Amino acid sequence: MSDARHSTARSIAAHAVLLTYTAIALFPVFVIVVNSFKNRRAIFADPLALPSGDSFDLVGYRTVLAQGDFLLYFQNSLIVTVASLFFVLLFGAMAAFALSEYRFRGNMLMGLYLALGIMIPIRLGTVAILQLMVASGLVNTLAALVLVYTAQGLPLAVFILSEFMRGVSDDLKNAGRIDGLSEYTIFFRLVLPLVRPAMATVAVFTMIPIWNDLWFPLILAPSEATKTITLGSQAFIGQFVTNWNAVLAALSLAILPVLVLYLVFSRQLIRGITAGAVK
Amino acid sequence: MGALSLSQVTKSFGATDVIKGVDLEVADGEFCVFVGPSGCGKSTLLRMIAGLEDVSAGEIAIDGARINDLAPAKREIAMVFQSYALYPHMTVRDNMGLALKQAGTPRAEIAQATDRAAAMLALDALMARRPAELSGGQRQRVAIGRAIVRRPKLFLFDEPLSNLDAALRVQTRIEIARLHRELGATMIYVTHDQVEAMTLADKIVVLRAGRVEQVGRPMDLYNDPDNTFVAGFIGSPQMNFLKGARLGLNSDTLGIRPEHLLPGGSRIQGRVSHVEKLGGETLAYVQAEDHGLLTLRMFGERDFAVDEALGLDFDPDRAFHFDAEGQRLR
Amino acid sequence: MAQRRAFRWHIAVFLAPAVLVYTAIMIVPLFGTLNLSLFNVVEGQRVFVGLQNFATLLGDPRWSASFWNALGNNAWFFLVHMLVQNPVGVALAALLSSPRLRGAAFYRTAIFIPTILSFVIVGFVWKLILSPIWGIAPGMLDAVGLKALFAPWLGREGTALTTLALISVWQFVGIPMMLIYAALLTIPDEVIEAAEIDGVTGWAQFWKIKLPLILPSIGIISILTFVGNFNAFDLIYVTQGALAGPNFSTDILGTFLYRTFFGFQLQIGDPHMGATIATAMFAIILLGVCFYLFAIQRRMRRYQF
């Protein structure tokens, strides 16, 4: 095909580089998942081989599931992540709406105050957060984690969502006002549905660090009943360090949920980034 | 020094042809306007000439040399985009000089070329500014200046006036016409606005659905259209199309321009449905019994009452006859 | 509008939940920590000591050696990210955004996957891969005839920190890639086409047209990398433990803070010194952010297309 702008050689080179990097990116995940389905001897003998008839073994998964606690850890992670996500999105969207929709004294200042948290990590307040949680009796509860993660997620959520909400047509909101809708109805019925793509972006950005966090579970909720899956797998690795089948199976199980969620949201993610966050 | 020739140029996206075998000759120094409704393929054709779109079949040649597979920069063309497409991070001077710099032209020569272009377009005072600090009209002039600096064989304009307001549009139109006279370069200009086409072109190419409907000088198209499409597209207000059978004619359709339809007479009966007085001229819309809504264009101020019965006449010598397929009967 | 005068309660209602949670859990504890760094326990009593803790941190040889070690390691950790992660991210994004690239969505999705994995997984899998016992890395190097190059990189003082930094780069390169990719997509097609016609193609197009236009995004990524790196903890903790071995060669401010606050082995935890380290980290990050905002961002232009 004749083509004045693009050379085939360049496109092959681009694919070669991207494929190489994709292999580097996926290789470790491949190693974990493949070996989790093999027996101990095969894991050591040929770590890069796919499980075959005689090397296939589910002993790792049996060990993990026999351990029993994994289901609980998983449940804890799910509760913490979903609850935090809910509050971040709700509170974040409300504050973003107030900041983007109304002109009031201190609007700019409030925006800066809330954006401060994007730059200053919440972990630096850990010492005092722990004291606060001890004082309020929330140590070793999931509520402590939900509170911390909500606070942690809010700054970015407010920032991204208010950028998006500035793009919602004023005429639409004014039409709602003329039709007699209250400010609350305008927010929930008109504006929220329109910024759904942005909400999805914020959801992904908020969710990943919460699901994967080790610091706060370790400090605020290390008890057996409140361990998250991240902390649980960390402890599990420490405990079963020589039982490679079990460790690999545990890691595979920890990868799965977040991978599925990511694949579901990945299209939204790039659209959200493109439309708002870094214009 | 800039003659363009297209032969059987075709563009397909998958199974659909968007440009269907276009043949065209543009002589050196000619101002050629591609005009047509949106989606007719005029911009695609321009972009194929620029090298921004591949040619699926056929040949494009400049001065007799085939350029189908040449990179855009090697075609000795310059293009002015609808959105101006200025480099936001560069000053006006750098915007205009980039192509020469890229081609390795000595610095003094670049400065000379940009200064000359700036003088032609009255951009001298703006050379150190960036695009964000310019008004729409100024940006447009920089975009044109960027094209001039390269001294191309062929200037390509892709709807360059559509982002300007009405007053500025007229002014820039005059400016472009002046540049064409001064530079004597070949220009290909795409627009959907037939007024721009009529006022600027040496040669108009009317396109519809990827095909050339007619090529000719503006007045040739106006006075001698090949078919109903061209007759209707060129001229404002639009030509009236009357049913030949109702007038006792052999031709299927009779086309009469609004200025050639005369009030008084008995060939056509109708009622005035609306009157627009523009001062210099008066437009009357008449609901004709047999032909639907017709437009009359009269010089000066004329009075009609809405709903008044009105008979119309026309000069048969100034009417165009078309067959059932819309082709002109001569 | 007469209503302008009345207090608009709905604004307060919209703002209240976010502001309350954010203030109570983030801002107040942050200042609590800053405040705590000004106290210490003397003879069982909690007393105000002013900047005494900072004097200890920087003056007492035992403390200051650890602090400077952690800070130096952290700076190196950041430098590796700036020199490897961001250029690789930009390069990948530039390739991804090349016109008519088939499978761009697949590459984008796949390359971002490490970013969504937890540190526990990332740390452990790389430990396994690089482990001399299991032998994936030695085996692979052997296959290309480079077995002699292999060393237990994570176990050696000289290479452990750089190895960890590269693992972190591997994990997070998806973020600069995505942000730069998004920035590249916002450059209008017509500007790129104008460049094609001006003869600016390939590498020249990237350097002269695209790179200047995505500089603001690169700036944002740099400051996010800075904040993230000076706040890092998890990766080091899961691969090398709280002691950040071998021999503290991978100790960064996050692990230093953790050890100080919670104690390790024989030393018991010290909330006041912990708060002091957190305050020092706060100051470093604030300094970096201010430097970015006032020295760099102000000189950068953002372009409206």
Image: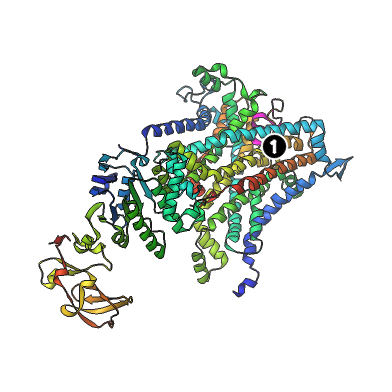
The residue drawn where x is 61% and y is 53% is: A87
The residue drawn where x is 20% and y is 61% is: B225
What element does badge 1 sit on? helix
Camera sees residue A271:
no
| Residue A39 x/y as whole percent | 52, 23
Horizontal side of A116 relative to A93 (left or right) equals right
| Residue B231 x/y as whole percent | 22, 63
In the image, is residue B106 above or below residue C20? Answer: above
In the image, is residue B45 above or below residue C250? Answer: below
In the image, is residue C133 above or below residue C49? Answer: above
Furthest residue in direction right, as rendered = C43
The residue drawn where x is 63% and y is 32% is: A236
Residue toward you, C277 or B104: B104
The chain holding disc 1 is: C
Residue toward you, A213 or C154: C154
Image quarter of residue B71: top left
Q: Residues within 10 Å of mark 1 (few under 14, many from 20)?
A: many
| Magenta stretch in the rendered image | C233-246
Residue toward you, A35 or A187: A187
Q: Looking at the figure, which quarter contains the N terminus of chain C?
A: bottom right
Residue C235 painted magenta: yes
| Residue B245 x/y as whole percent | 12, 70
